Amino acid sequence: MANSHDRGIDVKKGESVDRALKRLKTKLDTEGIIEEMRRRRAFETPTQRKVRKARSAVKRNRVRWRYISESAEKKIEERKAAAADSVQENPA
């Protein structure tokens, strides 16, 4: 019976142990279990928790802004190209 606590994988017939282990590690990593285990090895004070969360927020925002700025630059270039095309088509 599978439930939310099911952390295993089904090893397919003929699948190597190395491949199955890699799939398990990937699954645990995407679920955040490995990171949580590392965090829980020692007690984390409330101040340390705030610092960790603030750092992860800064990291998330950097990634967001990178994608936002890239898409904004693309839009600006597209608008410049469209404006240049319209000027060439309709010389006044």
Image (cartoon, grey):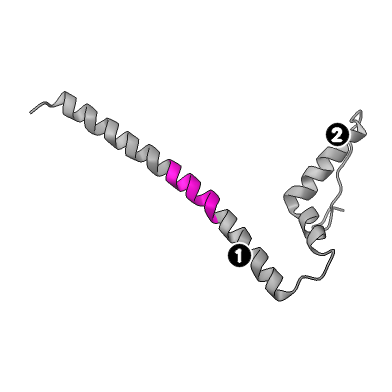
**Amino acid on which the number 1 mark rests in the picture:** Ala
Residue at (54%, 49%) from the top-left corner?
A: 63
Does the magenta-highlighted stretch encompass residue 64?
yes
Report how far apart the C-alphas of labels 2 and 1 lie in the structure.
Answer: 36 Å
Position in image of residue 66 (x %, y %) = 49, 46
Instruction: Tell me if residue 61 comes above or below residue 21 in the rendering.
Output: below
Q: Secondary structure at mark 1?
A: helix
Residue at (91%, 28%) from the top-left corner?
A: 14
**Image quadrant in which the C terminus is located:** top left
Position in image of residue 28 (x %, y %) = 79, 49
Q: What span is in magenta?
A: 61-70
Viewer-side residue, 45 vs 22: 45
Residue under label 1, please give it: 54
Position in image of residue 85 (x %, y %) = 23, 27
Does the magenta-highlighted stretch encompass residue 8?
no
Position in image of residue 60 (x %, y %) = 57, 54
**Amino acid on which the number 2 mark rests in the picture:** Arg
Q: Secondary structure at mark 2?
A: helix
Instruction: Tell me if residue 63 comes above or below residue 85 in the rendering.
Output: below
Q: Residues within 10 Å of mark 2 (few under 14, many from 20)?
A: few
Is 2 on the left or on the right of 80, as rendered? Answer: right
Q: Which mark is residue 19?
A: 2
Instruction: Tell me if residue 10 comes above or below residue 15 in the rendering.
Output: below
Looking at the rendered image, the disc whose residue lies closer to the viewer, 2 or 1, is 1
